[in-house]
Image (cartoon, coloured by chain):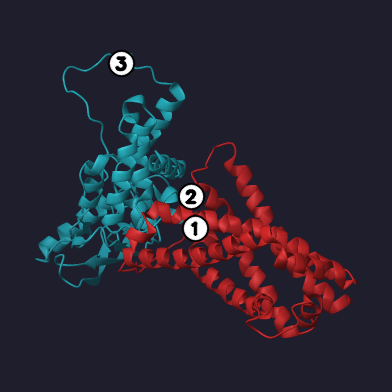
Chain colours: A red, B cyan
């Protein structure tokens, strides 16, 4: 396995790059999602159509999907190796001053992965034609889903966990890439904190507004 | 002080091992943790019970021998101290104290609280040195070294290789130790010559020995008795990537 995936440092590098690419993509996705708040379905559907048909976007789509898969597979492999590295656990543990959510990244990642699958079943696989649905009107599909209280709860909880995941992930990716500097690391941590709150909050506001005000 | 000590007892590397509870009424707040163990062991010996085996040497906080996991912390509670510098004042009369050996696949238990830390030596042997012609000591000013870099190299060089970073890390990763040993040389002109080979050899050896992967949690930095910084790990990463593309 290690011959294929490389050293521990290489594996972490790949995880960080894939993770940062996903972080960038989330911003694009959020921008498009805000179009759901407009009464007119045309801008959102046009953006969805553009994302589904543009050649450049299609190339990025392949990179993004590879990024998701690599981030998940490498994450699981690294975690298994970490568990194996300590076969006998401590009887008494105490918490030290650490990046709190870093201890739960695999569990947070699994929950996000489950949501991602539900999300793909609702939209991405519909676009690919693997699952039935009206792929020309994602605006209506999204608005319909955001009328279901259970779906909204699952959605909000998933984004809360995404926020926890991102809180550690953002600054951790920079550290893994070797970018740690007395002056700039606090800035990176600050941006990471803002990103991990603002982006999941942005995603979360949309279903709430649609459910209560549309 | 009256204490209840729950200590990991394991006859040898192959034995199963278990916690044994000792009610010890002979500790003083003026003792160090090791002195308390000495006093308890004296009692055990008098009672013809095998004393608790633990590593120790200098008892000055510089040798890195006395590693044990006390109440959930490597070297016990308290910042930037080794077990020998842990005072019994940190505990209260009537406390229950758990004492465990370092837990890591790469650090197998030899007996009781003693673990085999040869893995660290093997990583050092893989590349943690510079090759130079021996002879008389060169003039200290022969190679100019920037003050800031000299200071940083010194901060890395204070690592005593006790293994607390591995013990503290949830992944039993040795990255803080390895990164300190890489940094102390990478920052100096004498160490640059073999830097490319060094970082790859030491990382490969670390992986081969079964240490876990770094997840930037920072427990190592928080628990390190010498306060080695995570900056070292970022430097190791940089050194490794540049070595790979060269």
Q: Chain of mark 1?
A: A
B106 versus A212 height, above or below: above
The one of A165 and B37 positioned closer to us in this rendering: A165
Q: CA distance from mark 3 to mark 1?
A: 44 Å
Dots 2 and 1: beta carbons under 8 Å? yes
Left/right of residue B109 with respect to residue B3 in the rendered view: left
Q: Is residue B59 visible?
A: no
Q: Chain of mark 3?
A: B
- Which residue has dot 3 on it? B140
Q: Residues within 10 Å of mark 2 (few under 14, many from 20)?
A: many
Dots 3 and 1: beta carbons under 8 Å? no
What's the residue at 34%, 35% (across, down)?
Answer: B195
Q: Residues within 10 Å of mark 1 (few under 14, many from 20)?
A: many
Left/right of residue B168 with respect to residue A142 in the rendered view: left
Q: CA distance from mark 2 to mark 1?
A: 9 Å
* Secondary structure category for the residue under label 1: helix
* Secondary structure category for the residue under label 2: helix
Q: Chain of mark 2?
A: A
């Amino acid at each position: 396995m290690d011959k294929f995936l490389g050293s521990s440092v290489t594996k972490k590098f790949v995880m960080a790059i894939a993770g940062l690419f996903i972080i960038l993509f989330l911003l694009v996705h959020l921008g498009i999602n805000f179009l759901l708040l407009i009464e007119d379905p045309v801008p959102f559907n046009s953006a969805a159509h553009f994302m589904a048909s543009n050649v450049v976007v299609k190339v990025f789509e392949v990179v993004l999907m590879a990024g998701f898969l690599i981030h998940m597979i490498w994450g699981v492999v690294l975690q298994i190796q970490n568990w194996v590295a300590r076969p006998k656990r401590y009887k008494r543990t105490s918490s030290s001053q650490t990046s709190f959510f870093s201890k739960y990244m695999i569990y947070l990642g699994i929950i996000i992965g489950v949501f991602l699958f539900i999300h793909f079943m609702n939209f991405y696989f519909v676009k690919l034609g693997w699952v039935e649905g009206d792929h020309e009107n994602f605006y209506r599909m999204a608005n319909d889903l955001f009328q279901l209280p259970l779906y909204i709860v699952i959605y909000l909880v998933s984004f809360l966990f995404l926020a926890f995941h991102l809180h550690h992930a953002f600054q951790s990716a920079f550290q893994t890439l070797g970018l740690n500097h007395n002056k700039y690391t606090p800035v990176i941590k600050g941006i990471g904190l803002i990103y991990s709150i603002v982006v999941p909050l942005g995603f979360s506001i949309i279903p709430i507004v649609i459910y209560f005000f549309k | 002080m009256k204490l209840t000590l729950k200590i990991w007892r394991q006859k040898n590397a192959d034995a199963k091992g278990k916690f044994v509870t000792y009610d010890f009424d002979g500790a003083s707040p003026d003792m160090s943790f090791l002195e308390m163990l000495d006093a308890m062991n004296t009692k055990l010996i008098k009672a013809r019970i095998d004393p608790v085996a633990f590593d120790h040497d200098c008892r000055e906080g510089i040798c890195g021998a006395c590693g044990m996991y006390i109440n959930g912390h490597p070297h016990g509670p308290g910042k930037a101290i080794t077990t020998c510098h842990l005072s019994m004042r940190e505990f209260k009369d009537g406390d229950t104290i758990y004492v465990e050996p370092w837990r890591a696949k790469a650090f197998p238990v030899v007996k009781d609280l003693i673990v085999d830390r040869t893995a660290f030596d093997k990583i050092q042997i893989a590349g943690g040195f510079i090759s130079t012609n021996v002879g008389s000591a060169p003039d200290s000013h022969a190679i100019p070294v920037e003050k800031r870099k000299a200071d940083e190299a010194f901060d890395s060089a204070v690592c005593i290789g006790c293994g607390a970073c591995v013990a503290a890390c949830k992944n039993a990763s040795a990255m803080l130790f390895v990164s300190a040993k890489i940094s102390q040389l990478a920052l100096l002109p004498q160490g640059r010559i073999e830097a490319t080979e060094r970082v790859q050899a030491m990382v490969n050896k670390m992986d081969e020995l079964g240490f876990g992967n770094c997840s930037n949690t920072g427990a190592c930095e928080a628990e390190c008795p010498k306060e080695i910084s995570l900056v070292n790990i970022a430097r190791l990463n940089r050194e490794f990537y540049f070595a790979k593309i060269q």
